[in-house]
Image (cartoon, rainbow, N blue to C red):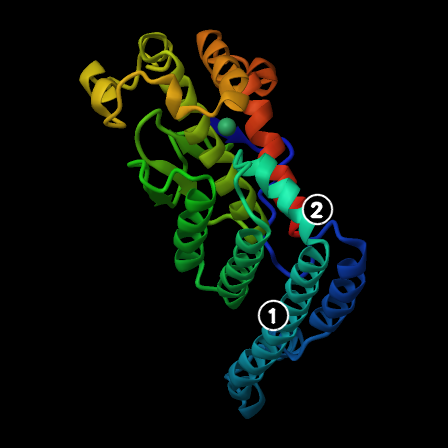
Amino acid sequence: MSIICNNISFKSTNLIDTDNSQESVIKSDLKTKLERSPEQDCIDFIKTQNKRPTLFSLLGKPIIESIDKKVKEAKQRKEIEAINKTCEKLIDNLTETQKIFQEVFMRKDLSEKETLEMIKRYHDIEIIGIKGDKETYIKELFKEAKSNYGIENLPNEIKIVYGNIRKNPKMLGYTDPFGDVQIRGDLSRKDIFNVVHHELRHVKQNYYAFNFNSEEFVKYSQPKNMEIPEEIFECAYDCKPDKSNIAPEYIEFAKKSLDAKKTYCSANKNENGYLAQWCEEDAFNTGNKMQNLFNL
Ligand SMILES: [Zn+2]
């Protein structure tokens, strides 16, 4: 299970890429400033003069660093303002937010109080992401989302990958049926937010499908190239087939997850087939819903 960059792009959260029109204006302004920065003037000066570094060129580096710092701080301020505003709105519309969280995490038990706490925690995690500690951001977000899905006791851990996942440059994330969730460490904040919720939805699908009918799940969830011994599947979640682990309203979800496993089509065999899979559609919808909710 993976994500192909169909509706999730590789764009980084740099200054000049966004699909938010309001932000585009701000970023376009910053872009203009950057285009006329002393950095470029300095480089041009050295090129045209073609001689030993002068006092001006020696001062160039601190000037560049100072400009970079200011641009970075301005960008961070805008992003912090945006997430503050979004979270305030989610709190103002708490009942609606609660409903969306209940759908996304398949937790009809989620109360308004829990919803409020979740929004606050997401806010704090986004601040970490904005300030730039990406690994901490990914780990905290994963922990938070896993707990929100109600699967914090499952063994899946997050693994940050630099470079291609499973040798596929299009793959942004990957979930072993009973193993680690992998995510690329070079993704933008909005893509990380989307992919973490996407991959954990797969974990939830697997958990329900396995509990609905473990024998069938094991039969169809073991890609031939993975070489995972069946015993791992049998004891992975330390649970025996027990439909009581699935709330009655989610039995249909468990059945659909299992049926999709039977005809699962990997991306390297048929990209369109892969994107049309019920499991993938369900995970894409979930990731996109969360990304849109937080206006990322
Ligand atoms: Zn997927």
| Front one among 134 and 95 | 95
> What residue is shown at x 31% (from left), y 27% (from top)?
178
Rendered position, 76 above or below 191: below
Could you tell me residue 188's position as x and y percent?
55, 51
Q: Mark 1 points at which residue?
A: 76
The x and y percentages for residue 196 are 48, 42
Q: Residue at the location (18% across, 17% down)?
A: 231
Ligand 1 contact, mark 2 (Cβ < 8 Å): no
Residue found 47% across the figure and 28% down from its top: 2
For mark 1, give the secondary structure: helix
Q: What residue type is labelled 2?
A: Glu
User: Which badge, 1 or 2, comes first in the chain's sequence?
Assistant: 1
Q: In which quarter of the image is residue 99?
A: top right
Residue with the mark numbered 2 = 96
Judge left or right: residue 35 versus residue 191: right
From this viewpoint, is residue 267 visible? no
